[in-house]
């Protein structure tokens, strides 16, 4: 299965090169992107099944007394380790564990769905789909890297395709939004690089290997400095108030599929970085700053919801709601308990799915009405019953309706965080009321009420659009009804992490 992981990482880049060098029609580029991203999705599912089978077998051996204790799933599976720059202690090292595998699979799913959403793209089609595949390789590499230098290189590789996808295929203010995105994220990356270099130089062994770095001890003052540098770099990407202002502009101008990837995958890189590096390598500093994390989480949750409630543009509303929902990830990370950390990872996955679905639904509405302004819409349900129905489903999932993935994620976060940070948790729980208010109010204004004469000729979703939406809904409901699909993978990895943070 090690070869499967490497193939899943590098196949999209090979597909991008194929699209770029092989002459042909735009149709060929679409099909290459669909076949490559679909193959990667199949490979990711195989990795998930193999990982889950290994955990299940180990647990059964323990119950039967064959093993005294299960092998720790905090150690990565599917590992490839090849010396790269021995003088620096850098290697090509990739592997997956319970923290990274769910996000790796989420990336594969959302890129495949983004290709389907982009099927009718007509502007510079070959370049568009090639950049989508380059982005998939970059993000996959971030989640799979076991070497900190490799992690940073993949992290930076992601910036170029996203900048171009917003700047070329975006809306009227695309250049502004793309430039703001790149300035914020490059600034965060610079701080993160400084933190990585200090971490490399301050340890007893100079290496970029993540497992070795996690096992080393560092001076207390140096831990605090490095922790803050890394946290700010990841907080920009998550994003955390007040470093979030690039996000609404990027979402507003990005095309639909890129908004799906921006919310569904790129924000998750920030949350993953905090869990993997801040919590995993610097536990003492994490304990020191846990109250600060909880405070920032509470502010982001409340602020994002309040600002979302005041928006008239559907995309800006969802973008600001993402700031609020990513605050729940931060709240789970601040508690340092196994349940809360499970909730944080579950929230990363569920938000990627739910917000991705919301942006798809907004795109379907915009394609037909050519407006995202809520006051200009109204009475669409009669002409677009499928779109209206599943927009409502996406809204209910976003507000945390039981039976859907968002409810499980938020419940785990609240359950794990309340004994540690009661005030911040209460703020998060109270914000659910605001979230329900602005989402239900938005749905009422967009789809219900009197039908307007200008919408008489609107059409509903096409079969391809219906299939794409159906996949989103199936996974969201599946995780909501049977959360063990994800928690069984995550728990064996977060338990040792939480024990280390508590010790």
Image (cartoon, rainbow, N blue to C red):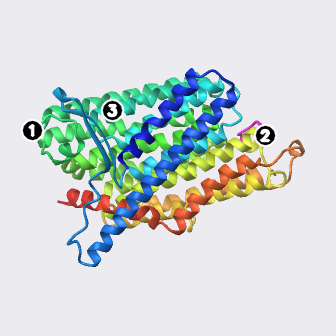
Residue 422 in sight here? no
Q: Where residue 316 sits in the image (x, y, percent)?
A: 60, 40
Left or right: 131, with 426 as reference point: right
Q: Are marks 2 and 3 in contact (CB under 8 Å)?
A: no
Which of the 4 quarters of the picture holds residue 89? top left
- Towards the viewer: 122 or 336: 122
Give the crowd class for mark 2: few <14, some 14-19, many >=20 residues within 10 Å. Answer: some
Q: CA distance from mark 3 to mark 1?
A: 21 Å
Task: Give SS at disc 2.
Answer: helix
Of label 2 and label 1, which has the lower sequence position?
Answer: 1
Of label 2 and label 3, which has the lower sequence position?
Answer: 3
Q: Residue tagged by mark 2?
A: 369
Q: Are marks 2 and 1 in contact (CB under 8 Å)?
A: no
Give the crowd class for mark 3: few <14, some 14-19, many >=20 residues within 10 Å. Answer: some
Task: Give SS at disc 1.
Answer: loop
Q: CA distance from mark 2 to mark 3?
A: 42 Å
Q: Residue at x 42, y 53 (%)?
A: 47
Q: Residue at x 55, y 33 (%)?
A: 132
User: Is 429 within the magenta?
Assistant: no
Task: Give SS at disc 3.
Answer: helix
Q: Residue tagged by mark 1?
A: 204
Q: Residue tagged by mark 3?
A: 152
Quadrant of the snapshot with the C terminus:
bottom left
Q: Where residue 486 sits in the image (x, y, percent)?
A: 44, 61
- Towards the viewer: 393 or 148: 148
Q: Main secondary structure of the magenta part?
A: loop
Stretch in magenta: 368-373
Residue 217 in sight here? yes
Q: Residue at x 22, y 69 (%)?
A: 69
Q: Where residue 227 sits in the image (x, y, percent)?
A: 25, 41
Which residue of the protein is positioned furthest toward the left in this rendering?
A: 204
């Amino acid at each position: 299965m090690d070869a499967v992981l490497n193939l899943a990482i590098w196949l999209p880049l090979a597909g991008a090169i194929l699209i770029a060098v092989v002459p042909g029609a735009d149709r060929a580029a679409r099909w290459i992107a669909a076949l490559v991203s679909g193959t990667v999705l199949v490979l990711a599912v195989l990795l998930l099944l193999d990982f889950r089978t290994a955990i299940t077998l180990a647990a059964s051996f323990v119950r039967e007394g064959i093993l005294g204790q299960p092998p720790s799933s905090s150690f990565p599976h599917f590992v490839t380790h090849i010396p790269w720059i021995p003088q620096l202690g850098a290697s090509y090292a990739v592997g997956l564990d319970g923290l990274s595998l769910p996000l790796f699979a989420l990336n594969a799913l959302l890129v495949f769905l983004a290709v389907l959403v982009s099927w009718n793209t007509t502007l510079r089609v070959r370049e568009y789909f090639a950049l989508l595949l380059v982005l998939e390789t970059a993000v996959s590499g971030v989640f799979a890297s076991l070497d900190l230098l490799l992690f940073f290189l993949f992290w930076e590789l992601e910036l170029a395709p996203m900048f171009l996808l917003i700047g070329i295929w975006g809306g009227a203010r695309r250049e502004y939004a793309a430039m703001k995105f790149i300035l914020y994220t490059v600034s965060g990356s610079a701080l993160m690089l400084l933190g990585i270099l200090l971490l490399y130089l301050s340890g007893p062994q100079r290496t970029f290997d993540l497992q070795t770095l996690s096992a080393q001890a560092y001076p207390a003052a140096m831990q605090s400095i490095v922790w803050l540098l890394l946290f700010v770099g990841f907080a920009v990407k998550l994003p955390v108030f007040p470093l979030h202002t690039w996000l609404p502009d990027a979402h507003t101008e990005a095309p639909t599929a890129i908004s799906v990837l921006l919310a569904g995958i790129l924000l998750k890189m920030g949350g993953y970085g905090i869990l993997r590096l801040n919590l995993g390598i610097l536990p003492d500093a994490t304990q020191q700053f846990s109250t600060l994390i909880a405070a920032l989480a509470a502010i982001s949750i409340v602020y994002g919801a309040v600002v979302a409630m005041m928006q008239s543009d559907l995309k800006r509303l969802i973008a600001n709601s993402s700031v609020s929902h990513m605050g729940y990830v931060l709240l789970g990370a601040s508690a340092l308990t196994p349940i809360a950390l499970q909730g944080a990872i579950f929230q990363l996955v569920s938000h990627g799915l739910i917000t991705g679905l919301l942006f798809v639904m907004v795109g379907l509405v915009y394609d037909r009405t050519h407006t995202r302004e809520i006051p200009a819409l109204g009475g669409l349900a009669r002409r677009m019953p499928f779109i209206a129905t599943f927009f409502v489903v996406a809204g209910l999932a976003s507000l945390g309706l039981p039976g859907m993935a968002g409810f499980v994620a938020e419940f785990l976060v609240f359950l794990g965080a309340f004994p540690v940070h009661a005030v911040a948790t209460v703020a998060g729980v109270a914000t659910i009321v605001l979230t329900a208010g602005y989402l239900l109010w938005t749905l009422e204004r967009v789809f219900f009420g009197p039908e307007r004469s200008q919408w008489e000729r609107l059409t509903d979703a096409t079969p391809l659009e219906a299939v794409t939406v159906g996949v989103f809904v199936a996974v969201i409901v599946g995780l909501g009804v049977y959360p063990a699909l994800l928690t069984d993978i995550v728990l064996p990895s977060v338990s040792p992490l939480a024990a280390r943070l508590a010790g």
